[in-house]
Image: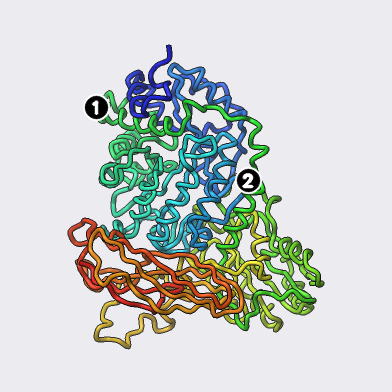
Amino acid sequence: MDFPYKNSTLPVEDRVEDLLSRMTVAEKIGQLCQSPMLEYNINRETYLEHIRQGHWGSRILADTAWAGNAPGETVSPAQLNEIQRAAVEGSRLGIPLIIARDVIYGQQTVLPIPLAQAASWNPEQVQSAYRCIAKEAASLGIHWTFAPMLDIVRDPRWGRVIESSGEDPYLTSQFAKAVVKGFQGDSPADEDSLVACAKHFVGYGASEGGRDYDTTEISDNSLHNVYLPPFAAAVEAGVETVMSGFNDLGGTPVSGSQSLINGWLKSEQQFDGMVISDWGSISDLAYFGVAKGAEGAAAEALKAGVDMAMTNEAYEDHLEALLEKEAIDITHIDEATRRVLRTKFKAGLFERPYVDEYKHKSVMRHPEHLAQALTVAEQSMVLLKNNHDVLPIEAKPMTIAVIGPHAHSKRQHLGSWCLDGRAEDVTSIYEGIKAWTAKIDCTIELLTEEAAFTDEMVECAHRADLVILCTGESHRRTGEARNVAELTLPAGQEELIRAIGEVGKPLVVVQCTGRPVPSAATEQFADALLYAWQSGTEAGHAVARLLFGDVSPSGRLPMSVPRSTGQIPMYYARKPLGKMRDFQDYQPYKDQKDTPLYPFGFGLTYGEFDYSNLRLSQAELAAGETLYATVTLRNKGKLTATEVVQCYIRQQVASTTRPVRELKDFCRVTLEPGESKEVVLSLPAEKLRFYGINKTFSLEPSTVELYVGGDSNAMLGTTVEVS
């Protein structure tokens, strides 16, 4: 007779408690251990026996902590079924493993990097695209992914900025919910869904100097108002797992922080899912000197609330001994095991432990998935300059040079954290433009050269009527442990832009970077600048459709673009500058403006939008009420275009200092030439709460300024009284 925990009709909590009651201490500890099972084919029999003995509860399909930079073996559904069979049919209790892989923003179909996705300002579209990515990964037998990354990043020198949604907590929170829902779907138990994981809890993106793994110093006020809200949004969206970071936060490494993991996350937010350490972050507790050796580190992490160790040795080698010494209590192990089992039951692993070993062949790069990836890529690219309306390019007989380091690049468009995308599936920018021009009636001649010789590219520019110069970074310059000290384009590219610019032909620069990077030569010589980021497998098609006007650019910056490295950190939601009350001619820098090169939320379109007639639904706002701001938006331009209408606030008086601007709502609006529309933005009073002097979130009475416009410098404003 089957045990109650195998009865899928029973409530999850009943199944968890029944199974927990039947487990030995060793089996419980095994559930808390995640193994990479390195060199599987060599160690196959040893690993399968470990699984039969219940030593491990999960496998991570990665060879190192830096898997994004050094992808290992590909995913084999047959191998995963073999492993799962050892757990389900060979172990005493038949507890399946949960199989994890870094499916960050793509499987075989690869979306733009998350920073680019945030530039779409379209969480709904991103959610739809992630459903496709979840289907591809799930078809291989993957159950669990380590995304979304919810770190707020205000230093673009940090390599992992590519995985973030940028500098703003509200925008990041919207994409947190979108990606969680995209991966998990209606239920993580569905066969085409994955368990999502919100990371890196918390503050990792604030590493000093943009140096990965460096210490982070964040005030209590900023922690609660800026860095924690995206995690609260992910919990609200139903995220099943959270990853603890390996950063030292104000003297306490987060993976050993009881106040943050057991306190804020599990108690205050009532998160009932599983917390997994980042790779090696438990061992780092000893390295940081806050625990004595590996054994002490294991005790600290478990008591803080880290339920599963990535990787296994951090718990496997020490928890039983710690229990015997009474350094930890069995209740700690029981609670961690309970959370791991709950995740497995909610993921449907007991009912669906195996995968159809051939299903992936009909799922990978499905036409629907490619269409979704193309749409996200188109909406993510940001037009920053368009002097003399050089774009869109008119379809008429002409000669166009498509040159530069990124004209023919492929693997680089996949970004750093891409384990399973294939370079051969990427459409390069030149290929995308060639495919587009082949469809039209008139003859557009394309010229190109390889990027090895700049003199040949200059000669190519001389022979053209218009030049498309594709600049940017390699994927090897971004991602984990890939930081830069100077926020500049790679060596030689400024000189290349200058040389091409001095030819004197109309110049369109397509910049493909994993971070916002200013370029003095681009500012001086380019007639148009399109930020194309690292935009995945459909990059080339998206660039072509934007440059030739099939689609009007609609991306908006999720991070401010600084003028130079010396301005960092440069973000829009700054606090009021001191002394400006009576020193109004003060200059923060003597050698440069203190404003960004391009502000947060900025982006051009092929239309021209006018904002007018801003009015509010009420003059006062109290708790429990919703304020509606209505504005008239008109497209004065000659082409159909999409505007991202943005709403910002500033609280005039508060118990603590508040930012000069805070994003509180936004929406995308598409208008035909000459068309007008009444756009309504929603501000529930809940959105105006903040963490104040009493160390709680509350709505404080004040006059609140409200601004609506096309970027964070929006000038059309009014006020509301908050009571």
Quarter of the image where the N terminus is located: top left
Given residues 633 and 484, the one toward you in this image is 633
Question: Crowding at label 2, few (<14), some or many (≥20) Cα neighbours within 10 Å?
Answer: many
Given residues 460 and 633, the one toward you in this image is 633
Label 1 to label 2, Cα distance in Å? 48 Å
Left or right of 606 in this view: 630: left
Query: Callout 1: helix, strand or loop?
Result: loop
Residue 156, above or below 331: below
Which residue of the protein is positioned furthest toward the left in this rendering? Answer: 694
Query: Callout 2: helix, strand or loop?
Result: loop
Residue found at x 29% / y 75%: 719
| Amino acid type assigned to the residue bearing label 2 in the image | Gln
Residue found at x 27% / y 61%: 625
Residue 298, above or below 109: above
Residue found at x 53% / y 50%: 128
- State the image coordinates of residue 510 (x, y, percent, origin top left): 63, 69
| Residue under pointer 1 | 326
- State the image coordinates of residue 615 (x, y, percent, origin top left): 35, 75
Q: Tell me where residue 112 sits by quadrant.
A: bottom right
Question: Crowding at label 1, few (<14), some or many (≥20) Cα neighbours within 10 Å?
Answer: few
Q: Nearer the viewer, mark 1 or mark 2?
A: 2
| Amino acid type assigned to the residue bearing label 1 in the image | Glu
- State the image coordinates of residue 292 (x, y, percent, origin top left): 30, 38
Q: Which mark is residue 108?
A: 2
Residue found at x 43% / y 74%: 709
Badge 1 or badge 2: first in the primary sequence: 2
